[in-house]
Image: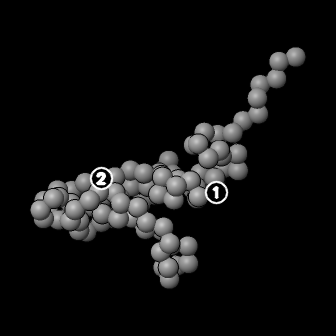
Amino acid sequence: MIVRVSYDEGKTWPVSKMLSPGPAAYSCLTVLPDMMMGCLYEKEENSAYETIAFARFSLEWLTEVRDSLARKYNPDYAPNGLIATEPERRD
């Protein structure tokens, strides 16, 4: 199962990453409440219809940190997945 990203309404697909090798079939992709992505799909080594699998991943993983849903919704987002904060001052 390969997941792809398009930034131009499906005209091109410049980003792709393999979730699992081998045959795969019907899939459903969604953005989860915590801004991670979820992909429910059929897979197996011999026939694509043997197992239903669920993969959970971030846009950062998919794009190798070139894009981030968290950064779009939180301007203080840091690429390592942590929220950037000011250091605590001790006077």
Return the x and y of residue 4 as percentages of the image width and height. Answer: 43, 68
45 vs 6, left or right, is left
Tell which residue pokes out farthest to the bottom in this image. 11
Q: CA distance from mark 2 to mark 1?
A: 25 Å
User: Which residue matches tag 1?
Assistant: 72
Q: Are marks 2 and 1 in contact (CB under 8 Å)?
A: no
Applied colour scheme: one colour
Q: Describe the element under mark 1 as helix, strand or loop.
A: helix
Q: Amino acid at mark 1?
A: Lys
Is the C terminus in the top left, top right, bottom left or bottom right quadrant?
A: top right
Can you give x and y, in whole percent of width and height, for residue 31 in the image?
A: 46, 58
Q: With respect to residue 3, does 6 lie above or below?
A: below
Q: Is residue 48 left or right of residue 79?
A: left
Q: Is residue 30 visible?
A: yes
Give the amino acid type for the residue marked by disc 2 in the picture.
Phe
If you read the primary sequence from the N terminus, does the residue marked by circle 2 or circle 1 appear first?
Answer: 2
Residue closest to the eye, 29 or 80: 80
Q: Residue at x 39, y 64 (%)?
A: 3
Query: Image height check: is 34 above or below 10?
Result: above
Q: Position of residue 79 (x, y in %)?
A: 61, 47
Q: Nearer the viewer, residue 83 or 34?
A: 83
Task: Tell me what residue is drawn at x 22 percent, y 62 percent.
Answer: 22
Residue drawn at point x = 64 percent, y = 57 percent: 72
In this picture, residue 43 sits left or right of residue 83? left
Quarter occupied by the N terminus: bottom left
Q: Is residue 29 visible?
A: no
Give the crowd class for mark 2: few <14, some 14-19, many >=20 residues within 10 Å.
some
Residue at numbered disc 2: 54
The location of residue 10, given as percent across then percent down, is 48, 79
